[in-house]
Image: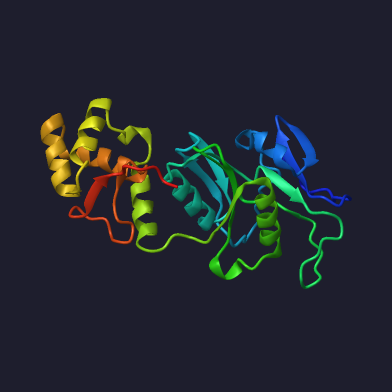
């Protein structure tokens, strides 16, 4: 259940709101929050649209969750794309909780601060959890972000403010995302062949040719398989350079941090 308006916190400690199975829970923001399945939580506040709204919103099909995740801007959509590209993120959700700041909390400028809804929750393969806010680089000076960072430090959570991907990585991942779904995933046999070929640095063109010969599959099919593995991080390319058929590709031997 999503809320139209968040309640006030009358205590001297932060509190957290989360909606699970239609029940809104208001609890202390302490280390026990790490046990809450935020990936199953409903967005704590509603997503509203109106005429002439300036930002673009929609649903991104996340290969991390196998379901659609709501976003409220193209920058949030880019974060969801980047999260699908990050092997260490194993689950996520949009706006699953709200922090209610202690009574009489103010910014350095004296502005009253009541609550904050982080944009995304992430759970990592290591078992750690984290929150992500998404904002343009010129809008990151937000007192709510600093309060959220301090609270995450107390909880032992990771906190990130995502400001966007740099070019050409942004354009490359946007294009590779077209190959992220399972329809482009290689068969177990082809998967082993590809990892073996790219165990040493090889150009994309040469690797596709070699894999096509060994697997007896067309180059178009094999190329789709390689691009799928590149997006999901099993194969590595230099994100600071444009991806071409002459790009050097290799197997990623270590997990992303």
Quadrant showing the N terminus: top right
The quadrant in which residue 86 appears is top left
At x 50% / y 44%, what residue is drawn?
Answer: 60
Outermost residue, bottom side? 109
Q: How many marks?
A: 0
Q: Do we see residue 219 in this rendering?
A: yes
Observer-nearest of 225 and 72: 225
At x 38% / y 52%, what residue is drawn?
Answer: 174
181 to the left or right of 188: right
77 to the left or right of 41: left
129 to the left or right of 205: right
The quadrant in which residue 116 appears is bottom right
Q: Would you place residue 49 above or below residue 129 in this image?
A: below
Outermost residue, left side? 213
Q: How is the image coloured?
A: rainbow
Q: Position of residue 242 (x, y in %)?
A: 28, 60
Observer-nearest of 39 and 105: 105
Q: Would you place residue 252 above or below residue 50 in this image?
A: above
At x 16% / y 43%, what residue is drawn?
Answer: 207
Q: Position of residue 227 (x, y in %)?
A: 29, 44
Q: Position of residue 138 (x, y in %)?
A: 57, 70
85 to the left or right of 71: left
The quadrant in which residue 240 appears is bottom left
Q: Do we see residue 1 in this rendering?
A: no
Q: Position of residue 189 (x, y in %)?
A: 23, 26
Outermost residue, right side? 10
């Amino acid at each position: 259940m999503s809320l139209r308006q968040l309640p006030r916190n009358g205590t001297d400690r932060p509190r957290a709101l989360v909606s699970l199975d239609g029940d809104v829970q208001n609890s202390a923001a302490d280390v026990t929050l790490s046990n809450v399945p935020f990936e199953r939580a409903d967005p704590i506040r509603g997503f509203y649209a109106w005429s002439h709204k300036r930002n673009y919103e929609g649903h991104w099909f996340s290969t991390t969750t196998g379901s659609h995740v709501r976003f409220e801007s193209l920058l949030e959509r880019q974060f969801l794309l980047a999260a699908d590209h990050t092997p260490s993120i194993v689950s996520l959700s949009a706006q699953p909780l709200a922090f209610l700041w202690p009574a009489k909390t103010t910014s350095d400028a004296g502005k009253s601060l009541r609550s904050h809804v982080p944009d995304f929750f992430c759970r990592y393969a290591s078992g750690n959890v984290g929150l992500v806010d998404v904002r343009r680089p010129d809008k990151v000076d937000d007192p709510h972000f600093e309060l959220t960072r301090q609270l995450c430090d107390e909880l032992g959570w990771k906190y990130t403010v995502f400001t966007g991907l740099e070019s050409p990585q942004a354009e490359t991942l946007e294009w590779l995302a077209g190959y992220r779904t399972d329809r482009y995933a290689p068969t177990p046999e082809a998967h082993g062949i590809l990892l073996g070929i790219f165990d040493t640095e090889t150009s994309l063109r040469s690797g596709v040719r070699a894999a096509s010969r060994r697997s007896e599959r067309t180059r178009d099919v094999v190329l789709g398989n390689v691009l799928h593995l590149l997006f999901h991080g099993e194969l590595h390319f230099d994100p600071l350079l444009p991806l071409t058929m002459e790009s050097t590709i290799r197997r990623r031997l270590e997990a992303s941090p």
